[in-house]
Every structure is written in C-alpha cells, then in structure tokens.
Image (tube, grey):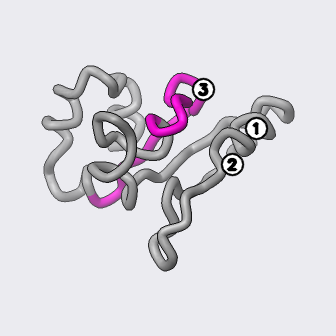
C-alpha cells in the first residue's frame, strides 16, 4: 500500500500533519510518498521541506520535490547533506 500526500497544500498553505500520517502508515505497513514541491526552500532548518520540519525524513519512503526536480536543480539538492541520495533517485 502507498499513501501519497503533499507536505504543504498549495491553495491554502496548510501543512500536512506528517507525524500523524507517518504513524498511520507505519501501523498499516504502508509506504509514504510526500510531495514537497511547495515546501522545499521554505520549511525545515535546511529548507528541505515538511519532512525535515518534523524530523521525519528517515521514516518516509519517498520524498518528491515535484517541479524543483523538473526545473533542473537536483544537483543543488544532492549537495545538501540532509537529503539522502536515494530520495533524489526515487524522485527523478
């Protein structure tokens, strides 16, 4: 099973309740994909998004940066020590 959620919902700017979502996914043995397209550069100490803000990056299966990847900036993300190379590979 795969659950998919935006880290930040673009219309209102609401932040997903990731701690609760991660708990639900773990309870049901589901993988979680978080789309951080609207959170990257804005949330978290190093700007990597909602998963970093809540300290949950290591408990999320795939972190996707949407248009950030499409616009040709994955090299900058690869150089950020807070982002695992495997996450970039899965997101591209």
Please give the name of the residue rendered at 15% of the width and 47% of the height, measured from the top-left corner: 73
Residue at the far front: name it: 45
Q: Which residues fall within the magenta stretch?
A: 52-67
User: Is residue 11 toward the left or the right of residue 77 in the image?
Assistant: right
User: What residue does disc 1 label?
Assistant: 25
The reply to whether the magenta stretch includes residue 46 is no
Is residue 15 rendered to the left or right of residue 27? Answer: left
- Find out whether residue 55 is within the magenta segment: yes
Q: Secondary structure at mark 2?
A: strand
Q: Can you tell which quarter of the image residue 92 is in?
A: top left
Q: CA distance from mark 1 to mark 3?
A: 10 Å
Mark 3 and mark 1 in contact (Cβ < 8 Å)? no
Q: Is residue 20 left or right of residue 44?
A: right
Label pair 2/1, CB-CB below 8 angstroms: yes
Q: CA distance from mark 3 to mark 2?
A: 13 Å
Residue at image x 76%, y 37%? 25
Quadrant placement of the N terminus: top right
């Amino acid at each position: 099973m795969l659950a998919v959620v935006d880290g930040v919902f673009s219309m209102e700017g609401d932040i997903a309740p990731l701690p609760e979502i991660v708990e639900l996914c773990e309870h049901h043995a589901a993988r979680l994909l978080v789309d951080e397209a609207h959170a990257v550069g804005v949330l978290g100490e190093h700007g990597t998004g909602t998963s970093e803000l809540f300290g949950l990056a290591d408990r999320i299966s795939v972190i996707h940066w949407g248009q950030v990847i499409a616009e040709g900036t994955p090299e900058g993300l690869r150089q950020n020590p807070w982002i695992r190379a495997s996450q970039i590979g899965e997101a591209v």
